[in-house]
């Protein structure tokens, strides 16, 4: 497909602007920038989960420039994230914590020397295992999203006692790890007292601010470049230790330093999705009208830092019920801190809620789509605020029609073809429509070409492309007249690529800057050009967030081998209502990418804990299975028209995460429909079906 060359390119399937650069290898990633006289760093990680480092013994090697540990590392200033205060303390708080860094002339010398370092550690007993009855569960003050920890309305226990039917089930989701194609990496160098980082991240402005804080620098002295980024999924949404370590090492050896984390280090240094234990109780009338919903979650954090995943928050928004409750309890373990992973909270939370709803539908012999429709609220279920727009029922109905749900026999284990049991399943999708303050500038030259600048970032989503479309539209000029510069903290400050907020936030700023520029174009452009800037911050802060969500419905068809339990996903379909879609090509990629990750969550992905060592047993792509093309036969996404100008001026709700919300439950529900086996412990491996 060729790039449209016309005004009004929002809504057209423009191919990725940087596609040719990426496929020819011309696009530069964090450790690919040519830098003269560069040194290489390699991390030394703690082999124990808890203790005190009392000394290190580093062998002499003429290629080694420095071996840093807390005994000699430069002092850092401060950070709200204690994991960024690297090499400052003898305390070891988790296995895999960086306890030393070797810097050498070559990558090979750095790695070899790091592997030869001997550590003296006073080892302490540790606790790495989450359990529903963990003896030290506590109640966090609030969730990571800022939402309250617990909510309660009515009398859930009384309603459950009086309900015509109840469901009381516990679902477990395992720890998971983000697997961006490009592992976390940084090239760092200092120019006098200014720090330059080529760093793989989800937000150059935010990372510059964090790094500046750690080194006690004015943010203007830190320059973060992230022109191309090979995925992140949340794991690059804040600075990770690699950025700090590279900058610290460059200061010490006084030449540029490269630190590219090996894949295995991603399992300890950049976060994981917390495992969850989720009890869901539902009470309903014989007609399937919910009288009570309770969703109680147990999950983990580290001893260093609290990350309280908002797992049950979806249950506050999805279905009506007069009596309702959600809660989150946590254990502080001697483990790395859990962090964001695509739809943090919503993705695991919807597994429990949407599988429990399916169990209720089955127990009442009501079609699971019909049951959901019977519990559709008129206003936000917990606070009564109106919805800005909500097409959940429309997604269920239209999705069902397109998927071919109609003739489904609601009973499980009814359809067999050859050696395969076949089943279908459905689950809802919901994701908050967030925006964050961003600023952009637009400059037109006398030749009519426009350069737009915004410190946004494209982590593979197509954001660079849609911002070109937004700018061309706002200016009423052809796409090829526009160049949008992103991925650099020196550009006008912008929010991170996170919380599915990038398009809505950055397009607000870019649209505003381009409209402001257009208003000034009443006279010929002067020889020096004309610039306009726009700060969307005040308008973003004035936005009323209540009732703003994107919705969807996921449909899955699976077949399960009657002898081996092997699960094949023959069809996966997502029907969405996400406001305005700026580019159908990149939007579809986001949806099916999320659904693919949902399939991984349902069937493949699991970080297995060895509680005796406090380490993950599997820590590479050979043993942590992410889905491949062969794992799904048909995967497709579609969306409804939706016009909701209250979310942002372009009506964009955000699409990065909703594909992983509910899609795992649709697959798990389809497996039950195929086999009659309810697996409540993800992922659904074949041994659980036999
Ligand atoms: Mo996403 S987990 O908000 O980067």
Image (tube, grey):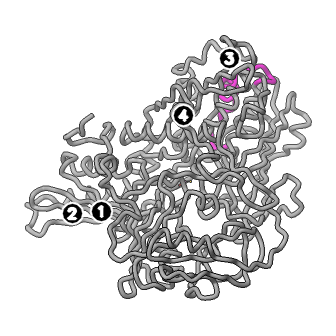
Q: Position of residue 221 (x, y in %)?
A: 39, 81
Q: Is residue 266 above or below residue 248?
A: above
Residues marked 1 and 3 touching at CB (< 8 Å): no
| N-terminal label among 4 and 3 | 4
Q: Residues within 10 Å of mark 1 (few under 14, many from 20)?
A: many
Tag on residue 453? 1
Q: Position of residue 549 (x, y in %)?
A: 55, 45
The residue tagged 3 is 420
Q: Is residue 582 above or below residue 635?
A: below
- Judge from the rendering whether residue 113 lies leftward or rightward of residue 286; answer left or right: left
The residue tagged 4 is 391
**Segment colored magenta:** 362-381
How far apart are the alpha carbons under marks 2 and 3?
A: 61 Å
| N-terminal label among 2 and 1 | 2
Is residue 378 within the magenta segment? yes
How far apart are the alpha carbons under marks 2 and 1?
A: 8 Å
Q: Residue at x 75, y 64 (%)?
A: 140
How far apart are the alpha carbons under marks 2 and 4?
A: 39 Å
How far apart are the alpha carbons under marks 1 and 3?
A: 55 Å
The residue tagged 2 is 443
């Amino acid at each position: 497909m060729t790039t449209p060359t016309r005004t009004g390119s929002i809504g057209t399937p423009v191919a990725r602007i940087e596609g040719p650069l990426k496929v020819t290898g011309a696009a530069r990633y964090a450790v690919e920038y040519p830098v003269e006289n560069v040194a290489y760093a390699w991390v030394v990680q703690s082999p124990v989960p808890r203790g005190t480092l009392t000394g290190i013994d580093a062998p002499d090697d003429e290629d080694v420039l420095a071996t840093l540990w807390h005994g000699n590392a430069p002092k850092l200033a401060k950070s709200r994230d204690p994991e960024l205060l690297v090499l400052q303390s003898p305390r070891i708080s988790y296995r895999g914590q960086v306890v030393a860094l070797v810097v050498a002339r070559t990558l090979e010398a750095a790695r070899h020397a790091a592997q030869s370092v001997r550590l003296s550690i006073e080892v302490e007993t540790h606790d790495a295992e989450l359990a529903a009855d963990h003896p030290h569960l506590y109640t966090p003050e609030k969730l990571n999203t800022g939402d309250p920890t617990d909510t309660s309305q009515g009398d859930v226990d009384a309603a459950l006692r009086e309900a015509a039917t109840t469901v009381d089930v516990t679902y477990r989701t395992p720890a998971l790890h983000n697997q961006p194609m490009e592992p976390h990496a940084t090239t760092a160098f200092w120019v006098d007292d200014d720090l330059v980082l080529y760093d793989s991240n989800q937000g150059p402005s935010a990372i510059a601010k964090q790094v500046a804080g750690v080194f006690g620098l004015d943010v203007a002295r830190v320059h973060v470049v992230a022109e191309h980024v090979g995925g992140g999924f949340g794991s690059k949404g804040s600075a990770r230790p690699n950025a700090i370590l590279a900058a610290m090492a460059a200061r010490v050896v006084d030449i540029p330093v490269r630190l590219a984390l090996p894949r295995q280090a991603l399992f300890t240094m950049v976060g994981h999705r917390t495992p969850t234990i989720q009890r869901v109780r539902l009470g309903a009338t014989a007609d399937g009208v919910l009288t009570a919903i309770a969703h109680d979650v147990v999950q983990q954090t580290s001893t260093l830092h609290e990350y309280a995943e908002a797992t049950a928050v979806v249950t506050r928004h999805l279905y009506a019920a007069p009596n309702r409750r959600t809660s989150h309890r946590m254990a502080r373990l001697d483990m790395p801190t859990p962090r964001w992973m695509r739809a943090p909270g919503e993705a695991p939370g919807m597994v429990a809620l949407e599988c429990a709803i399916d169990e209720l539908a089955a127990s009442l012999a009501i079609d699971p789509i019909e049951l959901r429709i019977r519990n559709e609220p008129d206003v936000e279920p917990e606070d009564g605020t109106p919805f800005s727009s909500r097409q959940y029922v429309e997604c269920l109905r239209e999705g069902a029609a397109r998927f071919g749900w109609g003739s489904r026999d609601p009973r499980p284990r009814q359809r067999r073809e050859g050696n395969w049991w076949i089943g279908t399943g459905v689950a809802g999708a919901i994701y908050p429509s967030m925006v964050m303050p961003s600023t952009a500038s637009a400059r037109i030259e006398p030749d009519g070409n426009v350069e737009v600048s915004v410190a946004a970032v494209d982590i593979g989503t197509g954001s660079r492309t849609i911002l070109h479309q937004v700018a061309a539209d706002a200016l009423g000029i052809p796409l090829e007249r526009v160049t949008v510069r992103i991925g650099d903290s020196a550009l006008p400050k912008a929010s991170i690529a996170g919380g599915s907020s990038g398009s809505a936030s950055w397009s607000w700023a870019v649209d505003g800057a381009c409209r402001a520029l257009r208003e000034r174009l009443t006279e010929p452009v002067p020889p020096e050009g004309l610039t306009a800037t726009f700060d969307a911050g005040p308008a973003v802060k004035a936005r009323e967030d209540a009732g703003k969500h994107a919705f969807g419905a996921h449909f899955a068809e699976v077949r399960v081998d009657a002898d081996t339990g092997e699960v094949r996903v023959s069809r996966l379909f997502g029907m969405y209502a996400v406001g305005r879609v700026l580019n159908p090509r990149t939007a579809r990629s986001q949806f099916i990418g999320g659904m693919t990750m949902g399939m991984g969550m349902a069937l493949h992905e699991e970080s297995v804990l060895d509680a005796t060592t406090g380490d993950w047993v599997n820590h590479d792509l050979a043993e942590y299975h992410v889905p491949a093309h062969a794992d799904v036969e048909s995967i497709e996404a579609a969306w409804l028209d939706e016009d909701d100008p209250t979310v942002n001026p372009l009506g964009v709700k955000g699409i990065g995460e909703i594909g992983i919300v509910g899609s795992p439950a649709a697959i798990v529900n389809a497996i039950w429909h195929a086999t009659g086996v309810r697996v409540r412990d993800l992922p659904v491996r074949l041994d659980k079906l036999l």
